[in-house]
Amino acid sequence: MPISPNSSNTGGNSVIIITGVNLSGATAVYFGDSLATITANTPTMITVLNPPGNGVQQVVVQTNGGKSNPLNFFYIDTPITTSLSVDSGPVAGGNTISIYGYNLYTATSVNFGANSATPTVISDSEITVIVPANSGPGAIQIIVTTTGGSTAPLSYLYEDVPTISSITPTSGSTLGNTIITIFGTNLSNVTSVTFDGNSSSFGVINNSTVSVSSPAHAAGSIDLVLTTTAGSAILSNGYTYISEPGI
């Protein structure tokens, strides 16, 4: 006697279909000790609206011929989300984020505003999802839907990729520690600035200005790469290291 679906939220009132034999004239369908509402009945199928419940309950059909064998039915608690591994990313999407919370193991979809994505369940407290593209930059709400219901929203920020328009100065000592100002756009959420792959210390002034201290490097022109949560901007051969004079 199969049952489909075999789970619902704790509030019940879901359409449940039970199939089997000799089911005509069903007088009652029990979910544990609670009665379901029968909406359709044939010799091979019963459709019901399940009652509210918690945990695992046994479903039993009663007819004039007696009671059926029991089937397990699972009531799923309402999901709760608490945090995101990353709360911002590029407008183009494609980045993977983790969503943390409780009662997430039956997650079926994640809405990013008006856009939907399919999650991968890691555990009852974590799911991952590939972020869909958005129509433009701005804040949206993330809502996770499970068999148990939908979560309260978490905020996520879509950002444009950064650009570098200029830097000053454009050269400095091979010993490093030259203070350089980077000008561009979408620089609020900088995560790193590298000089030929070497990390540097930096400070965000505003959305269009970042201050950085150059690391030591051999003489020559190198690529400067600025990375934010939305992507990277590369200034090819944009900075030149100059050797100290000697006499």
Image (spheres, helix red, strand yellow):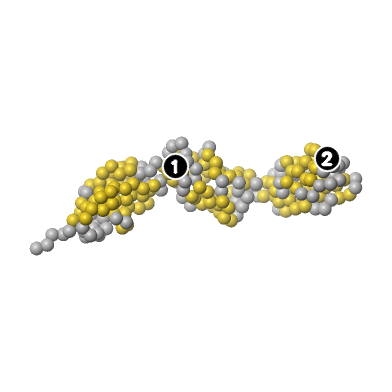
The residue sitting at 79% across, 50% down in the picture is 1
Question: Residue reaching furthest bottom?
Answer: 247
Earlier residue among tags 2 and 1: 2
Q: Residue 49, how many percent across, how many down?
A: 75, 41
Is 198 displayed left or right of 135 in the figure?
left
Is 158 displayed left or right of 16 in the figure?
left
Query: Element under label 1?
Result: loop
The residue sitting at 29% across, 51% down in the picture is 224
Q: Identify the image quadrant of the C terminus.
A: bottom left
Q: Is there any visible trace of residue 79 in the rendered image?
A: no
Q: Residue 188, how many percent across, how many down?
A: 36, 45
**Would you call the spot at circle 2 few (<14 residues within 10 Å), some (14-19), or many (20 or more)?**
some
Q: Which residue is mark 1?
A: 92
Residue 116 position by quadrant:
top right
Q: Amino acid at mark 2?
A: Thr
Q: Which residue is mark 2?
A: 42
Query: Element under label 2?
Result: loop
The answer to which of 28 and 118 lies nearer the viewer is 118
Give the CA distance from mark 2 to mark 1.
51 Å
The residue sitting at 23% across, 60% down in the picture is 218
Residue 186 position by quadrant:
top left
Q: Residue 110, how many percent across, how many down?
A: 56, 44
